[in-house]
Image: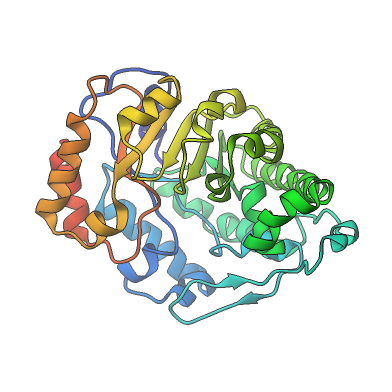
């Protein structure tokens, strides 16, 4: 992310009126490798390919704020691998982290991993160290510390269904698991910040919060997210949940979150209402059915409808409701930018 883009992002979060509205997209392994002409496996295994793909994106679309920017990641495997999850790799599909907990009693055997040594975490850091000079030479800085969220990680370690059921059958074990995960996540976030002092943002992704009710959110998400977002004093506290977001939305200000990427099923006016118009919203056209599968006219119509849905256009960054999905074309991205006035 460039200094200008970071300043724009901070201005929007501070509630300043920006015209035209900025455009931002979360880009990572579901979209970036194939769009850049390489396999997903090459993107993960070949650091030069990873750099090539990210450079291609920022050069092709210099007016778009790509979030978090030069994301060093291994799909969903980075954090689970630190706990010992085995990862299954494919040539051109996303990898998968196997669960390690078959019964809740195994939670008592878990230790807090060391993010400087365990799993894929050191490789994430090493990749950024290796290419930091090139990233800086392009006018970009590493600005975000990133992690999957506590419920998301718990569901990988235990299994989605098993974890959600255990919230009712073994609540103490679930909370202990979340405490271990939270301690690891805080350490992981701080390790990234200590390694790259330019970091001034925290980015957490957790879709599992969309599958629980308000009481469960208060018990199993709120305290742990507050602890994670308090890992260090960050200017931008960014949260992604493109599962149902109505339950978590009213709690975002209390957690400290000031930038939210949410499901396209929720409208911008609804989300402004649920967050008290205090959180910057990143959205919100359908990512798959419009941005990926639609044509440029579909994209322009959807963007225009989003713009016309809100009278107050402060605290809005135009995007899709989720990360950039596979198979989004250059043509559709450019159509998006033309409709918003962000185009060269």
Q: Residue at x 44, y 19 (%)?
A: 276
| Residue 68 appears left or right of 58 | right
Q: Which residue is situated farthest in the left direction here? A: 297
Q: Of 36 and 167, which appears nearest the observer?
A: 167
Q: Of 69 and 94, which appears nearest the observer?
A: 94
From the viewer's perspective, is residue 8 above or below residue 178?
above
From the viewer's perspective, is residue 192 above or below residue 98?
above
Q: Residue at x 79, y 47 (%)?
A: 171
Q: Residue at x 42, y 48 (%)?
A: 137
Q: Quadrant of residue 203?
A: top right
From the viewer's perspective, is residue 19 above or below residue 114?
above
Quadrant where the image shows the N terminus? top left
Where residue 202 sits: x, y (%)? 57, 38
Q: Of 98 and 213, which appears nearest the observer?
A: 213
Quadrant where the image shows the C terminus? top left
Q: Of 166 and 239, which appears nearest the observer?
A: 166
Q: Quadrant of residue 37?
A: bottom left
**Can residue 36 be seen by looking at this rendering?**
no
How many marks do you count on the picture? 0
Where residue 9 sits: x, y (%)? 39, 30
Where residue 20 sits: x, y (%)? 20, 29
Q: Which residue is situated farthest in the bottom direction here? A: 91
| Residue 116 appears left or right of 123 | right
From the viewer's perspective, is residue 69 above or below residue 7?
below
Q: Which residue is situated farthest in the front direction here? A: 169
| Residue 232 appears left or right of 128 | right
**Can residue 232 be seen by looking at this rendering?**
yes
Where residue 19 sits: x, y (%)? 22, 25
């Amino acid at each position: 992310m460039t200094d200008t883009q970071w300043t724009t992002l901070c201005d929007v979060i501070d509630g300043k009126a920006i015209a035209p509205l900025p455009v931002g997209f979360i880009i990572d392994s579901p979209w970036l490798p194939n769009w850049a002409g390489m396999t997903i496996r090459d993107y993960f295994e070949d650091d030069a390919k990873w750099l090539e793909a990210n450079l291609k994106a920022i050069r092709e679309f210099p007016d778009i704020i790509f979030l978090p920017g030069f994301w060093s990641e291994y799909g969903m495997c980075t954090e689970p691998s630190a706990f010992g999850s085995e990862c299954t790799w494919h040539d051109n599909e996303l990898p998968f982290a196997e669960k390690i907990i078959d019964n809740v009693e195994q939670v008592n055997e878990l230790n807090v991993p060391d993010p400087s040594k365990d799993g894929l975490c050191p490789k994430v850091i090493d990749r950024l160290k290796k290419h930091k000079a090139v990233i800086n030479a392009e006018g970009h800085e590493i600005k975000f510390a990133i992690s999957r969220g506590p419920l998301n990680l718990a569901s990988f370690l235990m299994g989605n269904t098993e974890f959600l059921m255990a919230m009712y059958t073994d609540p103490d074990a679930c909370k202990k698991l979340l405490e271990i995960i939270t301690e690891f996540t805080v350490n992981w976030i701080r390790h990234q910040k200590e390694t790259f002092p330019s970091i001034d943002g925290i980015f957490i992704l957790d879709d599992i919060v969309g599958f629980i009710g308000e009481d469960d959110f208060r018990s199993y998400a709120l305290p742990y997210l507050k602890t994670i977002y308090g890992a260090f004093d960050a200017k931008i506290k960014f949260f992604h949940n493109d599962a149902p977001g109505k339950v978590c939305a009213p709690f975002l200000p209390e957690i400290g979150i000031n930038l939210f990427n949410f499901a396209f099923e929720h409208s911008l006016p609804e989300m402004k209402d649920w967050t008290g118009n205090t959180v910057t919203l990143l959205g919100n056209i359908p990512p798959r059915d419009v941005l990926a599968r639609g044509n440029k006219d579909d994209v322009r119509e959807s963007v225009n409808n989003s713009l016309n849905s809100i009278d107050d256009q402060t605290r809005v960054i135009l995007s899709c409701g989720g990360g950039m999905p596979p198979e989004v074309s250059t043509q559709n991205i450019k159509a998006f930018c033309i409709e918003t006035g962000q185009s060269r």
